[in-house]
């Protein structure tokens, strides 16, 4: 089981557990840090917790999109046009 205190470290680039804990030894420790960076860039919540028998459960929660302003359909933008 991964110690809860190790999770924040594992979300940083180039961080891995002990070499005997990784599958084939080919990884660089970038996968979780990429997920964390994408979550941060998009303002979403990332939660990681250790599984009882090893590994992590990762949950990424996206907020529901804001409804469009009154009278606009989803995907449409409001623009102002001035005539001379």
Image (cartoon, rainbow, N blue to C red):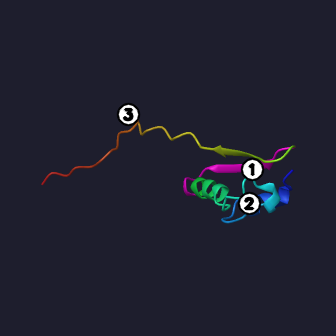
N-terminal of the two: label 2 or label 1?
Answer: 2
Q: Does 48 appear in magenta? A: yes
- Residue at the far bottom: name it: 14
N-terminal of the two: label 2 or label 3?
Answer: 2
The x and y percentages for residue 69 are 42, 39
- Residue that badge 3 annotates: 73
Residue drawn at x 60%, y 57% is 34
Image side of residue 63 versus residue 1, left or right: left
Give the number of the disc on residue 79: none
Evaluate if marks 1 and 3 touch, with contact meaning CB atoms under 8 Å apart: no
Q: Say what secondary structure mark 1 lies in.
A: strand
Residue drawn at x 37%, y 36% is 72
Q: Which residues are magenta?
A: 41-52
Image side of residue 53 versus residue 10, left or right: right
Residue 42 vs 52, above or below: the answer is below
- Residue that badge 1 annotates: 48
Question: Which picture quadrant has residue 12?
Answer: bottom right
Q: Say what secondary structure mark 3 lies in.
A: loop
- Residue that badge 2 annotates: 10
The x and y percentages for residue 58 are 71, 46
Q: Quadrant of the C terminus?
A: bottom left
Q: Nearer the viewer, residue 40 or 83?
A: 40
Evaluate if marks 2 and 1 touch, with contact meaning CB atoms under 8 Å apart: yes
Q: Does 57 appear in magenta? A: no
* Disc 2/disc 3 C-alpha distance (Å): 42 Å
């Amino acid at each position: 089981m991964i110690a809860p205190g190790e999770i924040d470290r594992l979300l940083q680039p180039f961080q891995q557990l002990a070499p005997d804990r990784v599958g084939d030894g080919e990884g660089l420790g970038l996968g979780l840090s990429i997920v964390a960076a994408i979550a941060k860039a998009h303002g979403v919540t990332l939660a990681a917790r250790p599984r009882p028998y090893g590994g992590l459960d990762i949950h990424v929660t996206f907020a529901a999109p804001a409804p469009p302003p009154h009278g606009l359909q989803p995907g449409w933008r409001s623009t102002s046009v001035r005539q001379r």
